[in-house]
């Protein structure tokens, strides 16, 4: 969870923090080395003013440096959050919620996470998403109606866990 200005605190689990640190290390060590090799190869092809391969390699280098800068910025603002330190009475960040869709009667499980950790395929939804915002602060047994771009979602909160 971070503020809208992009310079506030970023809450991450310890596992995600370690994952991002490894990613940054790999980009700095291997990514930069690979990029230098590609630029060197492209440079060896002659006239740089008409060398599309060189231009592409330089552009890829800029993208790599941007990714490194973004990761460094995220990590510089990171604070570790531990689910054991949070109460279980309401839906908070790192809550595991079991919901029943009141329209389809299907049951779904989600974990509410920071935007940096969201992964819909792993049922990790951001606390800043419409669904995440709609669930925050709600209690077990409560029914919620959440407006989303495709209409309105209606859920009953069956269970909140850590």
Image: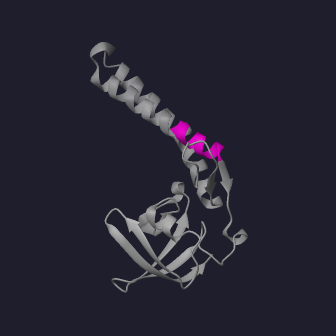
Magenta stretch? 68-77
Would you place residue 56 above or below residue 162 in this image? above
Q: Is residue 40 left or right of residue 17?
A: left
Residue found at the far right of this picture: 85
Res 161 → quadrant: bottom right
Residue 143 location (% of width, % of height): 48, 81
Number of numbered markers: 0
**Residue 69 forms part of the magenta stretch:** yes
Q: Image height check: is 29 above or below 98?
A: above
Colour option used: one colour
Q: Is residue 83 left or right of residue 39?
A: right
Q: Is residue 53 magenta?
A: no
Task: Tell me the quarter of the image containing the C terminus.
Answer: bottom right
Which residue does the image show at 37% across and 65% down from the upper left? 148
Q: Is residue 93 above or below residue 23?
A: below
Q: Is residue 132 above or below residue 78?
A: below
Residue 117 percent coordinates (x, y): 53, 58
Please report the residue visible at 31 percent of the width from the left and 15 percent of the height from the top: 46
Q: Answer yes or no: is residue 4 visible.
A: yes
Which quarter of the picture shows residue 77?
top right
| Quadrant assignment, res 45 | top left
* Residue 47 is at least partly visible in this image: no
- In what quadrant of the picture does the N terminus appear? bottom right
Q: Residue at x 65, y 78 (%)?
A: 89
Main SS of the magenta segment?
helix
Q: Nearer the viewer, residue 37 or 27?
A: 27
- In the shown orientation, is residue 17 left or right of residue 120? right
Residue at 44% over, 30% down: 62
Residue nearest the viewer, comparing 117 with 112: 112
Front position in the image: 38 or 10: 10
- Spot occupied by residue 67 in the image (x, y as percentages of width and height): 49, 39
């Amino acid at each position: 969870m971070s503020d809208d200005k992009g310079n506030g605190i970023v809450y991450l689990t310890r596992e995600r923090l370690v994952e991002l640190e490894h990613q940054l290390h790999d980009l700095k060590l291997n990514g930069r080395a690979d990029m230098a090799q590609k630029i060197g190869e492209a440079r060896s092809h002659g006239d740089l003013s008409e060398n599309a391969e060189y231009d592409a390699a330089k552009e890829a280098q800029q993208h790599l440096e941007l990714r490194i800068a973004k990761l460094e910025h995220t990590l510089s603002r990171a604070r570790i959050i531990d689910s054991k330190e949070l109460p279980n009475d309401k839906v908070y960040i790192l809550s595991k919620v079991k919901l029943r869709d009141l329209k389809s009667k299907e049951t779904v499980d989600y974990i509410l996470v920071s935007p940096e950790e969201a992964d819909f395929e792993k049922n990790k939804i951001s606390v800043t998403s419409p669904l995440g915002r709609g669930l925050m602060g709600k209690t077990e047994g409560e029914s919620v109606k959440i407006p989303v771009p495709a209409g309105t979602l209606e859920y009953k909160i069956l269970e909140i866990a850590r």
